[in-house]
């Protein structure tokens, strides 16, 4: 973070300074706060606190961060951002009463203290963004129903060639992860890449106000979180909040292959750049091919010219992600040739997202278990089918799939369709894990003449036992479900077994 004293932070967040009497040593609380300067990181986990840090006290289900204030200072923190008095120098934040802020409070926030601290953290992040943006910081926001994290990782890798870049780890994209990421930026940061998620209307707009982006990327509008939004149109309305928040001199990068995203061009005053495989796209992919590992090769075409790209990422869906990343890098000064070269060396950075590992016995595990929705599940199955078909003879393809959450009234039909898709793609075996995913198994059995090819098992342990019994060398296994299913335990067990 940029250097700020506790006194300055108190002014920024509208809080007050508190210093316990035994720490004053004859000085005033204001004097102590003015001399206590944050020179390190902002952390909400005492294990991450180091010299010069600011500790953020948040309530949780099992513990309350306020109880660890003294431990944080012992570890090197100069002070604490807190909702009540603690046994350490602190900035006490004001309470909040607006409905939106209270609606996004953390689990375990029974008294509103978490909402208050998050609101203050957002104010601090906004101040830092404003200061650094005035010095040339480019803020990039990415949203969409699927592919946000992979695209964010690609954008960050491209922009790192152009200057110091900060991006969140994994999917740290909510009201805590968003400002926390912003506060990783320092005086030398040139690019800040942020992933924006939403659980309801207004959430993306609020994140944009925390760190106003100049470049906004919308990847797609799918059926994830329908239980919260109610309809795909409502999802589109919320995702489009990103482009509505862009300044007039900003850039909206929109997927021309998705009609709901394309329509967002009417909702922004920013300049629009279309990406996709559509021939009318400003940044597009032509001559797309997949190799035997489902890695895409294509020609990147821009207004400047064209260049070949060979992705080292598995799945045709990464073509769209790569085009979005390319458009961002081009806007920030890269050439077409540079972007093509950088894309061709880019790697997967976030765990459990098309993480492909081949065991010594030849079994290949596609661990895509971090999360799932109908669109990402379909893309993963197509990747599995491509890799299996490339074998000579054809490799056996196993799809170990679990529940897709938050689909509302579409739950049964969405799972049924994924089961049917597995049959149409000629997946060899479908292992459906858990009673909640039963419609997937039923859909597979109702599509064509499948019988024992699809099996419903009660839990992760049963899936692991089945796979250990029946897998053979050269099989390809996809593991995917929503995060709540914790199906990565299957992938971990398979890879552990392969080392013995």
Image (cartoon, rainbow, N blue to C red):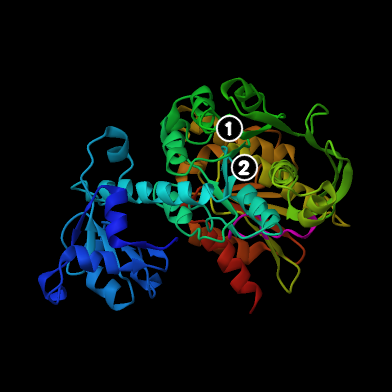
Report the magenta stretch's main SS: loop
356 left or right of 244 in image: right
Determine if residue 444 is in view.
no
Dot 2 falls on a residue whose secondary structure is: helix
Q: Residue 376, which numbered label?
A: 2
Residue 70 sits in which quadrant? bottom left
Residue 357 among those drawn in magenta: no
Residue at 55% in and 36% down: 415
Residue at 42% in and 46% down: 126
Q: Is residue 289 above or below residue 346?
A: above
Q: Where is residue 211 shown, x and y percent of the image?
A: 47, 44
Q: Are marks 2 and 1 in contact (CB under 8 Å)?
A: yes
In magenta, the rendered stretch is 344-355
Residue at 37% in and 47% down: 122
Residue in front for this viewpoint, 294 or 494: 294
Q: Mark 1 points at which residue?
A: 222
Label 1 crowding class (10 Å Cα cut-off): few <14, some 14-19, many 20+?
A: many
Label 2 crowding class (10 Å Cα cut-off): few <14, some 14-19, many 20+?
A: many
Q: Is residue 38 above or below residue 170?
A: below
Residue 348 among those drawn in magenta: yes
For the residues labelled 2 and 1, the Cα–Cα distance comes to 9 Å
Q: Where is residue 88 shown, x and y percent of the image?
A: 20, 69
Q: Where is residue 182 shown, x and y percent of the image?
A: 47, 53
Residue 277 sits in which quadrant? top right
Q: Quadrant of the C terminus?
A: bottom right
Disc on the earlier residue, 2 or 1: 1
């Amino acid at each position: 973070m940029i250097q700020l004293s506790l006194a300055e932070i108190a002014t920024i967040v509208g809080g007050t300074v508190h210093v316990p009497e035994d720490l004053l040593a004859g000085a005033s609380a204001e004097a102590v706060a003015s001399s206590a300067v944050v020179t390190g990181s902002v952390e909400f986990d005492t294990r991450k606190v180091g010299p010069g840090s600011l500790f953020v006290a948040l309530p949780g289900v099992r513990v309350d961060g306020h109880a660890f204030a003294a431990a944080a200072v012992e570890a090197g923190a100069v002070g604490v951002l807190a909702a009540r008095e603690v046994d350490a120098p602190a900035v006490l934040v004001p309470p909040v009463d607006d409905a939106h802020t209270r609606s996004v409070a953390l689990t375990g926030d029974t008294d509103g203290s978490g909402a208050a601290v998050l609101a203050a953290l957002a104010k601090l992040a906004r101040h830092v963004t404003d200061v650094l943006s005035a010095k040339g910081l480019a803020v990039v926001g990415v949203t969409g129903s699927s592919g946000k994290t992979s695209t964010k990782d690609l954008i960050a890798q491209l922009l790192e060639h152009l200057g110091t870049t900060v991006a969140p780890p994994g999917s740290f994209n909510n009201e805590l992860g968003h400002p926390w990421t912003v506060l990783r930026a320092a005086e030398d940061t040139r690019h800040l890449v942020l992933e924006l998620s939403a659980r309801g209307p207004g959430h993306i707009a609020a994140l944009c106000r925390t760190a106003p982006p100049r470049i906004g990327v919308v990847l797609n509008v799918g059926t994830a979180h329908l239980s919260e939004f109610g309809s795909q149109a409502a999802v589109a309305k919320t995702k489009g909040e990103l482009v509505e928040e862009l300044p007039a001199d900003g850039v909206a990068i929109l997927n021309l292959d998705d009609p709901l995203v394309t329509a967002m061009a009417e909702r922004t005053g920013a300049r629009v750049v279309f990406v996709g495989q559509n021939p009318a796209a400003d940044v597009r992919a032509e001559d797309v091919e997949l190799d035997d590992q489902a890695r895409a090769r294509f020609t990147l075409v821009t207004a400047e010219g064209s260049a070949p790209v060979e992705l080292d990422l598995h799945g045709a869906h990464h073509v769209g992600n790569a085009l979005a990343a390319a458009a961002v890098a081009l806007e920030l000064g890269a050439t077409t040739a540079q972007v093509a070269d950088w894309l061709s060396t880019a790697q997967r950075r976030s765990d459990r997202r098309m993480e492909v590992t081949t065991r010594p016995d030849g079994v290949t595990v596609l661990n895509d278990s971090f999360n799932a929705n109908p669109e990402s599940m379909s893309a993963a199955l197509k990747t599995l089918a491509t890799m299996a078909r490339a074998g000579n003879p054809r490799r056996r393809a196993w799809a170990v799939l679990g529940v897709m959450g938050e689909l509302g009234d579409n739950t049964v039909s969405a799972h049924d369709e994924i089961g049917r898709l597995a049959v149409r793609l000629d997946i060899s075996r479908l292992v459906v894990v858990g009673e909640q995913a039963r419609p997937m198994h039923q859909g597979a059995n109702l599509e064509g003449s499948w019988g024992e090819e699809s099996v419903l098992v009660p839990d992760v342990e049963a899936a692991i036992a089945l796979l250990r019994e029946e897998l053979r060398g050269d099989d390809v296994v996809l593991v995917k479900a929503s995060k709540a299913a914790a199906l990565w335990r299957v992938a971990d067990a398979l890879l552990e077994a392969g080392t013995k």
